Amino acid sequence: MATISMSCISLPTATFSKNRQLTRFSTRMSIASGSNETKCLGVQLTEGLGNLPKVVLTSSHGSEAELYLFGGCVTSWKVSDKDLLFVRPDAVFNGQKPISGGVPHCFPQFGPGAIQQHGFARNVNWSILDSENVEGNPAITLELKDDAYSRAMWDFSFQALYKIILDKKSLSTELIITNNDSKTFSFTTALHTYFSASVTGASVKGLKGCKTLNKDPDPKNPVESKEERDTVTFPGFVDCVYLDAPTEIQLDNGLGNTISISNTNWTDAVLWNPHLTMEACYKDFVCVENAKIGEVQLEPKQSWTATQQMSVI
């Protein structure tokens, strides 16, 4: 039994089966109009697609964000009723596969490696730890801790806290990883953000001078180089890591929006578009990801923190 609670009210209790699917979604309190919705200072917990628990953040300024507890995945961020994130048409909401789109987590492994692709954090249920509201800006903190499923592939005790804050024209996140084990562990991580875009018009500024690891044409043997362009575009298949990236880059999504992506402690960036390998939707999004490609090593009781702010400018 996983208890979901927030600072201002008592929220639903969700029971999960051994295969981590949501099997029951009930409330411990009276809910207006008999709906499965609870509102608290711009934070609303409801049922999303596939009956998975979904949180809706609504700012007093009119912006809105949605996130699923499965994967701790932000799936929508709307400013002036325009969704700046993209969820792929092949995305499934069944609690069996990661949600393909929005802002999925890659932890404790980015990309391929010793465990499953991009780790397990995007494929398990996070819980709600707390919520707050400051000057009309709702915020929620999710928590992920080790369990039998995670330990079967990565045998360490840890805590991941993920705070999401919605403002008028920005969506900010803070990720804190803490080593609760008696032994040292290391990890890599990323926020695999899908932005709505016109791929032929999209471009990214701020990466000139970075060392690059270009995975086209051979993902297993990336080509090392240096970015010489002021403006990086997406003319075809793109899968490139930018090491020691600046703390702010800008995405022109080709749809009339420029988005500043700033961060602390996400040392690297990744640009990705699958081009014809995903013919049904590649024209409608680009991925601009904050990442930590080099391993973070944490001693027992140590923590690592990284923040990201996406802002419409």
Image (cartoon, grey):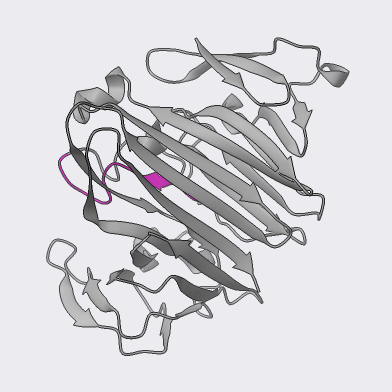
For the record, the magenta segment spans: 100-114
User: Was residue 75 drawn as part of the magenta stretch in this picture?
Assistant: no
Residue 231's spot in the image, x, y percent?
Answer: 44, 86
Asked whether 193 or 154 is in front, the reply is: 154
Q: Residue at x 47, y 72 (%)?
A: 248
Quadrant of the rendered image containing residue 276: bottom left
Residue extending farthest left: 221
Q: Is residue 200 left or right of residue 113?
A: right
Residue 294's spot in the image, x, y percent?
Answer: 22, 57
Q: In this view, does 127 lie to the left or right of 54?
A: left
Look at the image and tell me whether residue 125 can be seen: yes
Residue 82's spot in the image, x, y percent?
Answer: 71, 61
Measured along the vertical axis of the image, is residue 218 above or below residue 123?
Answer: below
Measured along the vertical axis of the image, is residue 204 above or below residue 125?
Answer: below
Q: Residue at x 29, y 22 (%)?
A: 149
Please identify the quadrant where the C terminus is shown: bottom right
Residue extending farthest right: 33
Q: Residue at x 52, y 74 (%)?
A: 251
Quadrant of the rendered image containing residue 109: top left
Measured along the vertical axis of the image, is residue 206 above or below residue 119?
Answer: below
Q: Residue at x 17, y 30 (%)?
A: 183
Q: How many marks?
A: 0
Asked whether 26 or 11 is in front, the reply is: 11
Look at the image and tell me whether residue 90 can be seen: no
* Main secondary structure found in the magenta portion: loop
Residue 52's spot in the image, x, y percent?
Answer: 57, 27
Quadrant of the rendered image containing residue 222: bottom left
User: Was residue 103 drawn as part of the magenta stretch in this picture?
Assistant: yes
Measured along the vertical axis of the image, is residue 114 above or below residue 62?
Answer: above
